[in-house]
Amino acid sequence: MDFPSRGPIKGAFAARLTALSLLCLLAVLGWNARDAMACATPCTVANGTYQVLEPDGWDGKTPLPVVVWFHGYGRTGKYVVNSPRIGGETRKNGVLLVALDGANKSWSVRNAPEQDRDEIAFVKDVLADVRAHWPVDETRVWAGGFSLGSSMVWDIACTHGELFSAYFAVSGGFWRPHPEHCDTGPDRMRYVHGTTDTVMPLNGRQIGEHWHQGRTFEGFTVLRQANRCGAEPTRMVTEADRRCWLWTECAAATEMEFCLHDGGHKIPPDWVDTSIAWANRLPKN
């Protein structure tokens, strides 16, 4: 039977033709199930934006481990996803990277200069939005950060530790005055700091007339005590160029690690890679 040369196409045949045309169009555009879920870049929530980087070879449906990353002062989420030391490592390790954008490229860390946003509300909004757009492995939702972003990680670990199942951070802790105690402890935390860091020194420093970066060892003690870890580490290990002290005899399934390297204010090249491996080895809550 010939197609009619004019007039509307009616009935079931028209419906089938329309559906076929739509599928062809979507195929041309490269549509798949993952595109239907993903939000625009940057993704937007009520209080800000975030960037997302999916891992290499993901099939578009298997639940993904997630690391939410807090950038350093003056950076952006876009910088994080393009960083070989962060985005490059999450891509190859099968992890969904969620790189948050700080308000005015900064974070509203407790006792720090900028207080532009309720960061806990922002993080909760982002987590809800990520779960609405990607399948998430709920046993592996982690937080990481560098510099002032690392201070943000410490704050969340201390006040809302239940938001993430593990934390790994670099070169940034509490600002003074240190909290006297934590409402919640970071069930699992891995931390590294350079002994020659002058941007956020181990012993802190004054910023302007009113603000002081905290003392890293004292701050970590507050976190350690919140987890009811002993005063002495369980063991000390050397890995790459780092010396690390581990506490494994703590409350519940808590594990804490504090590392030092001889460099300055930087993310060690293997830090995200080894931290993902560490987090993957932890018992599932």
Image (cartoon, rainbow, N blue to C red):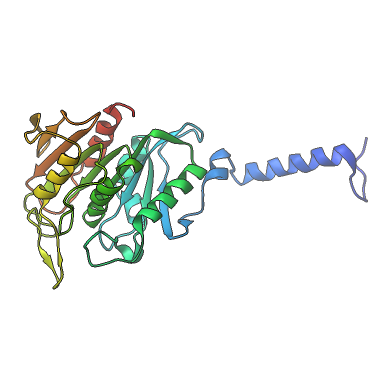
- Viewer-nearest residue: 20 or 142: 142
Q: In this picture, is 121 found above or below 61?
A: below
- Viewer-nearest residue: 114 or 84: 114
Quadrant in which residue 235 is drawn: top left
Q: Locate the C terminus by quadrant.
A: top left
Q: Locate the N terminus by quadrant.
A: top right
Residue drawn where x is 12% and y is 36% of the image: 240
Residue drawn where x is 6% and y is 50% of the image: 195
State how many labels appear.
0
Quadrant in which residue 186 is drawn: top left
Give the x, y percent position of residue 258. 13, 40
Give the x, y percent position of residue 86. 29, 46
Q: Residue furthest bottom?
A: 209
Q: In this picture, is 183 found above or below 138?
A: below
Residue drawn where x is 26% and y is 53% of the image: 152
Q: Is residue 153 visible?
A: yes
Q: Is residue 227 left or right of residue 161?
A: left
Give the x, y percent position of residue 218. 10, 49
Q: Is residue 82 visible?
A: no
Q: Is residue 198 left or right of residue 160?
A: left
Residue drawn where x is 24% and y is 29% of the image: 252
Q: Is residue 204 left or right of residue 88?
A: left
Q: In this picture, is 218 found above or below 76?
A: above
